[in-house]
Amino acid sequence: MALTFATFNIRNGWGRDGLHSWPFRRSSTLSTISALGADVVGLQEVFEFQRRYLSRRMPELRWFGQGRSGGYRGEQCPIAVHGDRLTVTRHETRWFGWTPHLPGTRLPGASFPRITTLARCWDQRTGAVFDVANTHLDEHVVANRVAGIEQLAGWLDQSVPTVVLGDLNADAADSAVFAPLLDAGFQHIEVSGGTSHNFTGAADGRQIDHIFASPHWIPEQAAVVRERHGRRLPSDHWPVRATLSLR
């Protein structure tokens, strides 16, 4: 049976974006996430007040993950799963750097700590067990993006079906960032067009939001979702959605 996964950078709620600021677009963000119809959603740039707004209005989802300063502090990369189908049996947040279990850890030269949320899911319908990782890599330093994805690849249990979601701040031309996952046997789920649009709504920006799947999965369909719900754009990124089935 197939499962639908999505990744979406919703733009941090403290951003000074004028009429694109969070209070003006939050209902569009909510509608966009709901319309994805995903069983698993990985979000990036989420502050706790944003997560509270979304979770209270989507009670069918269960949310997991810490902020990059620990607990509810700082930007989060939460994983949300549809509670009517999936149960998360364990989850944790790790930080890229020498002390991945210590909140606030960061790589050399990084502007901020960068994190990954990891979750193990149990499908109540089929009994299948799989892992999900959701991350947001360094925005400036290429070496940190590479180091982060290398560290993430090392955390993954290759014996378990796994899906990696996230804003990698890298496109397909930046092969060094993709390489650790590809070398581990993951397939990059191909989609058409850009995901980052800086609140223009354009489709020709950089494609920096990605989904990777371990060899256990068969991709059925995938796309950048550019449907608009409401007057405002939901973010400065478009979400990516993929339907995958286990072999």
Image (cartoon, rainbow, N blue to C red):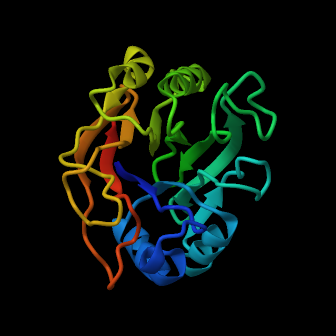
Q: Dividing the picture into quarters, in which one does residue 235 lie?
A: bottom left
Foreground of the two, 64 or 102: 102
Report the side of 215 relative to 180 (left or right): left
Residue 82 screen position, x and y as percent: 51, 63
Residue at image location 46% in from the left, 44% down from the top: 166
Foreground of the two, 164 or 103: 103
Residue 170 screen position, x and y as percent: 38, 35
Report the side of 127 relative to 78 (left or right): left
- Can residue 247 be seen from the camera position used here? no
Q: Is residue 121 above or below residue 225?
A: above
- Can residue 20 be seen from the camera position used here? yes
Q: Residue furthest top?
A: 183
Residue 20 screen position, x and y as percent: 43, 75
Quadrant containing the C terminus is top left
Residue at image location 25% in from the left, 70% down from the top: 227
Residue at image location 38% in from the left, 71% down from the top: 32
Foreground of the two, 3 or 140: 140
Residue 240 screen position, x and y as percent: 33, 52
Q: Is residue 136 above or below residue 214?
A: below
Q: How many marks?
A: 0
Report the side of 242 relative to 158 (left or right): left
Residue at image location 31% in from the left, 49% down from the top: 242
Q: Is residue 230 above or below residue 156?
A: below
